Image (spheres, rainbow, N blue to C red):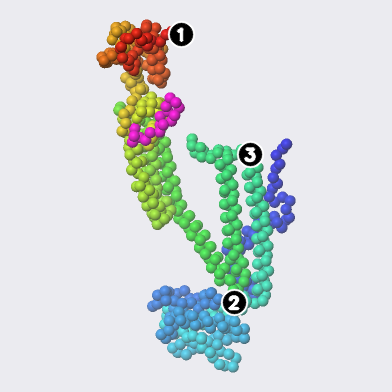
Amino acid sequence: MAEPRLSRPGRGRPFALRLAPWGALLVLLLTLVLPGAPGAWATPAPAAPAAPVAPAASEPPATAAWVELEGRRVLELRRVAGAQKPQEVAARASQQLGGLAKDYRIDPAWLVVREDPPYSMIGLEKPGGSFQPLFAVDDRASASFDLERPVLAERYRDQLRGAIRQYRSSHSLSTWLRGTALALAVLLLFLLWLRVQMGLNARLAAWLVASRRPLPVIRLGTIHLLDEIQLRALLQWLRRAVHWSLLLLVSYLLLPLLLGLFPPTQVIAEGLRSHMLRVVDGLLAGLVGSIPNLVSIALILAITAMVIRATNAWFSEIGRGRLQIPGFYPEWAQPTKRLVAGALLLAGLVIAYPYVPGSGSSAFQGAGLFVGVLAALGSSAVATNVISGLMLIYTRAFREGDRVEINGVIGVVQDSALLVTRVLTPRNELVSIPNATVIGASITNFSLAEREIHRPVALATTITIGYDVPWRQVHALMRAAAASVPGICDEPAPRVLQTSLNDFHISYELNACVRDVDRYRETLSELLAALQDEFAASGVEILSPGYHAVRDGSGSTVPRRA
């Protein structure tokens, strides 16, 4: 049966539902582009002139204050008349301006400027001719903007008029209705987009689970990083991360758009929007600014990788014997290659570190301090084993494949690393011995003699025979037993040594060379069996471990033939 195929995400859905993602994207773009106030769609009002931005003449900008209306800046006060402080005058004027804006009986055109040297008075001139001053502008205030006093007073007046008109326009009933309608439309588009997004996420999750298409195995050179199961789990994690990140991002972008549609929350919306723009601008500026450093890092790492490859190829040729250096043995090539590669990589990282973005920050310094403390706490034992491993490598005590005896463990060396040495015993047990223990123990290498001096390694075994047996007969029997074992070399010939004249018997030691050192234990076992057979066939009893030579009519210890 053919595998059921998943339909495309948009097929079979209403047109409005397929249009929802694009509508949501358009609305989100409007969040960042439009100034978010209903006044943007309201009846246009005369714009207020921008506040003067000329540099202050005698007052530092830090002492400036702002007259605000619903959190929006209207006038900048740098110097004020008399001994008052700009902050006090700004707070009082902000309260008065809010009252004027909410009192629809007051016409913004009633705000006028009257000259009363040395002041220019800004106040309300009602139709009856009465004048209510609000605040005064003196020569010091105008000098802080490098303007004439009447010019600055007229600019203040125009800005106050524009702020009142804008406030009343944005707080009209038509503006509230328009904002409500737009908010409902935006919410509808968001819900449609949310439904499509949830459906796409569910389909993608089902496809990752049910798909029978094999996924590639991720490798880094010869290192196996991810198999198919691990790759599917990683894709599922990425799917969830992208899904929820997208939901959070769209929800956050929706907030300033909805808040900007209603007058009381427009200031909050503008703050959120400006914060988002600052974050995006900072990220883009940081990314663009770090491009030269990233290029430098890539160049340093590329050069480091090329040098490591060149040294690896050089040491590989030494290990194969194609390149020879006097005094440098081929078995040193592999560990030296690793050491040189590690040193080169460390040097490359040290050179590239200053170019890493944020490397001089407190976070990087704290992380470096933490790593340094951990290294200091655990470096004692590690350093001991590493130094011991280097000593074992460069003293050529053994190498991989050698048959050795280390601290009572007999086996073949499987791995000689910087920290531990692994030995495979004849019982297929892999024993890991710390190099600090290896360097302090005696090491017997059964493979070195044949490889270095081209002589076979010899094994030795001792038996005890009574004084009643001639020693020449014992020698002949032992040599005959050795000659019958296939694993014993003919040259040099086996030899027998009398090592001790004991109280009740004589100790005879047989030394014989082994053909194959890998069968050392098997050859020794065969030799011991051959000794028993030879002496039993000749009627000579082996007094091992020891028998009292008292002949009182008891039987001999020689085994009978079956």
Say whether disc 2 or disc 3 marks the residue closer to the N-terminus. 2
In the foreground, 360 or 285: 360
Q: Identify which residue is drawn at 56% across, 92% down.
A: 130
For mark 1, what is the residue? Answer: 562
Task: Give the mark, 1 or 3, whose residue is nearer the N terminus.
Answer: 3
Q: Earlier in the sequence, mark 2 or mark 1?
A: 2
Q: Within 10 angstroms of label 1, few (less than 14), some, or many (20 or more) residues?
A: few
Asked if 429 appears above or below 279 in the picture, the reply is above
The answer to which of 197 and 45 lies nearer the viewer is 197
x and y, in percent, of residue 33 in the image? 58, 64
Q: Residue at x 47, y 86 (%)?
A: 136
Q: Quadrant of residue 99?
A: bottom right
Q: Nearer the viewer, mark 1 or mark 3?
A: 1
Cα separation, mark 2 vs mark 1, equals: 124 Å
| In contact (CB < 8 Å): disc 1 and disc 3 | no
Residue 294 at x, y = what percent? 45, 50
The quarter of the displayed image where residue 262 is located: bottom right
Q: Is residue 423 magenta?
A: yes
Please tell me how crowded label 2 is: few (under 14), some (14-19), or many (20+) other residues with Cα within 10 Å: many
Q: Which residue is mark 3?
A: 213
Highlighted range, magenta = 422-438
Q: Is residue 186 left or right of residue 412?
A: right
**Residue 369 locus on image (x, y percent):** 37, 52
Q: Is residue 222 left or right of residue 332?
A: right
